[in-house]
Image: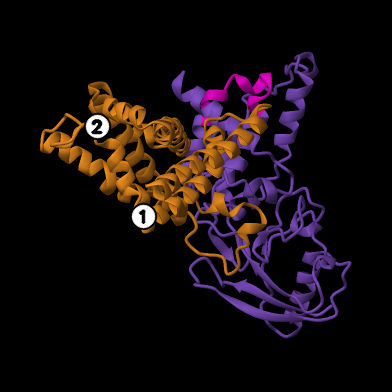
Chain colours: A orange, B purple
Amino acid sequence: MSVLSSSIARKVAMALSALFLIIFLVIHLAVNLTSLFSEDVFNEMSHFMGTNPLIQFAMQPVLIFGVVFHFVMGFVLELRNKRARNVKYAKFNGAASASWISRNMVYSGAAILAFIVLHFIDFWIPEINTKYILGDMSGVLPGEEGYRYFEELQHKFVNPLRVGAYVVAFIFLGLHLAHGFQSAFQSMGFNNKYTKCVKNLGTIYSIVIPLGFIIIALCHHFNH
Amino acid sequence: MNLTLKIWRQKGPQDKGQMVEYKVTDISEHMSFLEMMDILNESLVANNEVPIAFDHDCREGICGMCSLHINGEPHGPDRGITTCQLHMRTFKDGDTIYIEPWRAKAFPVIKDLIVDRMAFERIQQAGGYISVNTSGNTQDANAIPISKLNADLSMDAAACIGCGACVASCKNSSAMLFVSAKVSQFALLPQGKVEAADRVRNMVKQMDEEGFGNCTNTGACEVECPKGISLENIARMNREYLKASII
C-alpha cells in the first residue's frame, strides 16, 4: 500500500472510489426505475445483470472492492485525522466555518454502511445463495412461470419498517453526496471556472438519485 | 465593558494545563483583543501572578504571529483578520470568552497560549523556495513574461502569513491550505516551475511527517484564513502532486 503512503494519494484514492460509486448509483437507479414501468423489462434486466459472466465475475468483484475500499479508507482517514488533534478545544465552533454535512461525512457514511448491510441481507445474500450455492441459475421459481425478480422485489417492500429504513438511509446518502460529489472533484485537483457547474451538478445529483430510490421503494410499498 | 475570560493556562510543554477563569473590567470597545490581554496581564503582574503568555509581534495584521482560538474560532468571530485586528466592540458587556491555543498534534503548546509552529518552517525548508543565484547576475524578473492572471494568483497565494489558523480551524488539523499556498505561489511562476515537481513532493512529505491531518474539503480553513487564501490552491497542489507522482 506504499502508493497510499501520502495524504494526497489517499485523498485521490477516496475521490476515485467515490466517482466509481457515483457512476454505479446511476446504473443501479436506471435498472430499478424500470420496475415502475414494466415488470417484464425489470425481470429481463435483472436476469441479465444476475447471470452475465462479465458483470458477475468482473464488474461485481470490482464494485465490492470499490465499496469496501471507500468505507475502510474513510474510517481509517477519520481515525488518523482525529489523532492529529490530541488535545480537544474546550470550545469549537465548527458550524461557523463549515457545513454540518461536510464535517460529519463519517456519520452519514456509517448510516450508509448500515443500510448496505441490510441491503445485502435483503437481496445480495439470497441471490448468491440461490445462484451459486443451490446452483439455480434459471431465475424462475419452481412450479411457476416467468422470472422471480419483480415479485421478490415487491415482496421486500411490504414491511413498512424496511421501507422506512430505506428512506432514512437514502436521505443520509443524499447528505453524503451533497458534500461528497464536489469534494471528489476538488480532491482530484479539479477547481476552475467549471467548479460552479460541478457544484450545481452535485446538488442536483444528491437530490435526484436518492429521491429516485425513495420513490421506487414507496411505489412498491403502496402498489403491492 | 466587563468580561469573563476562560483562558488555557499551561506552565510548559510537559504540564497538563487547564482552563482558568479571569474577570476583566472597564474594557474599552475600541481596544484590540491583544490590548485587552495586555490589561489582564498588567493586573496579573500587579498581583504577583504569572502573566499569560501569548504570541504577538507587528500588531497590524501582517506578521502572522498572533494566534488565539477565541470562542471556538481562530482569530475570533470576525472574518479576514488576525487577532490583533479583532476589536472588543465585537463582544458585548458581560460576555464569556474562551481563549485557547491552536490545537494540533503538530503544534505542541510551549506555554499557555503559545504553540510551536516550527512544523511550518520545516515544511518551507523542504521546498518552499526557488534556487536562484543571487550573486549579482540575477536576471531582471520583469524580463520574464508572466500572464497578469498568474501573477495575480501567485501574489494571492503569497499573501499567506503562515499563522496556522487553517490548521486550527480544520476539524482534521490539516495544513493543506498553508502548504498549497506555498506550493502555488511558486508553481504559478516560470521561475518556480523548474523545481515544481520536487517541491510539491518534498513539502507534502514533510507535511505528512509533521503529523497534520488530511484535508476533507470542509472549507473551514478558507473561511477562517485572515488573508483569504482560496481552496483553489489546495486543488492546484493536488494537481501538482499528481503530475509530479505520475509523470
Q: Position of residue B110 (x, y in %)?
A: 57, 63
Main SS, magenta region, reads helix
Secondary element type, mark 2: loop
Q: Is residue B191 left or right of residue A137?
A: right
Q: Amino acid at mark 1?
A: Arg
Give the label on residue A147, or none: 2
Q: Left or right? Give the position of A174 relative to B55.
A: left
The relative height of residue A206 versus residue B226 in the rendered view (above or below) is above
Residue A198 placed where, x, y %? Answer: 61, 31
Label 2 CA crowd tier, 10 Å (few <14, some 14–19, many 20+): some
Q: Position of residue B149 (x, y in %)?
A: 76, 23
What's drawn in magenta, residue-wise?
Answer: B186-200
Dividing the picture into quadrants, the one containing residue B23 is bottom right
Q: Position of residue A126 (x, y in %)?
A: 21, 43
Q: Could you say which disc has been placed on residue A162 in the image?
A: 1
B221 versus B126 height, above or below: below
- The verdict on residue B157 being magenta is no
- Residue name at image x 73 percent, y 43 percent: B228
Residue type (three-letter) at the residue carrying disc 2: Tyr
Chain of residue at mark 1? A
